[in-house]
Amino acid sequence: LNNMKTLEDYNLKLKELENEFALKKSNLAKKFVFSNAEYGIGDIISDNIDAIIIERLQCSVTYGIPNVVYVGVHLKKDLTPRKDGSRVGIFKSHCSEIKLIKKAI
């Protein structure tokens, strides 16, 4: 910090600190979300609209609150994949209830 002679030096160091903080904040949110996820890869879940087989978990931060997003193959009512192969994300924060239909083996 002793070699900050100009405002440009200050701004560069500030930007470096902001980037470091943003990365640490993102990593903290991911750790929190993934350690509290109720379901895992291979589980079949449904909300009030869609059913999926989970392929991956993602972290979403909305209004400063980290939440899990379960992403996977969109299933039909008979729990077979749709012909179009579409993928859907089920956001824990957006639905009143997520139901486990089948636990992965």
Image: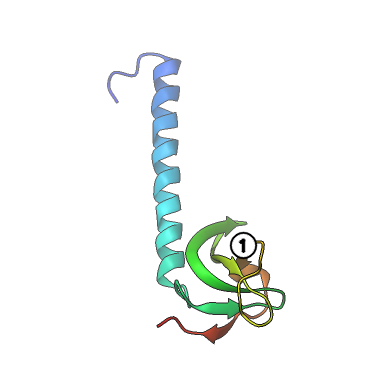
- For the point 58% across and 67% down, the residue is 73
Image height of 38 relative to 2, above or below = below
Neighbour tally class for label 1: few under 14, some 14-19, many 20 plus, Cα within 10 Å: few
- For the point 40% across and 62% down, the residue is 31
In the image, 57 versus 103, the foreground residue is 103
Q: Name, please, the residue furthest toward the right.
A: 49
Quarter occupied by residue 46? bottom right
Q: How many numbered discs?
A: 1
- For the point 44% across and 16% down, the residue is 8
- SS for callout 1: loop
Image height of 76 relative to 71, above or below = below
In the image, 33 versus 15, the foreground residue is 33
Spot occupied by residue 100 in the image (x, y as percentages of width and height):
55, 84
Q: Quadrant of the N terminus?
A: top left
Quarter occupied by residue 49? bottom right
Q: Quadrant of the C terminus?
A: bottom left
Spot occupied by residue 35 in the image (x, y as percentages of width and height):
40, 70
Q: Is residue 75 left or right of residue 17?
A: right
> Which amino acid type corresponds to the residue marked 1 in the rendered image?
Gly
Specify whether residue 103 is in view: yes
Q: Is residue 23 left or right of residue 54?
A: left
Q: Name, please, the residue furthest toward the front.
A: 83
Residue occupied by mark 1: 85
Spot occupied by residue 97 in the image (x, y as percentages of width and height):
64, 81
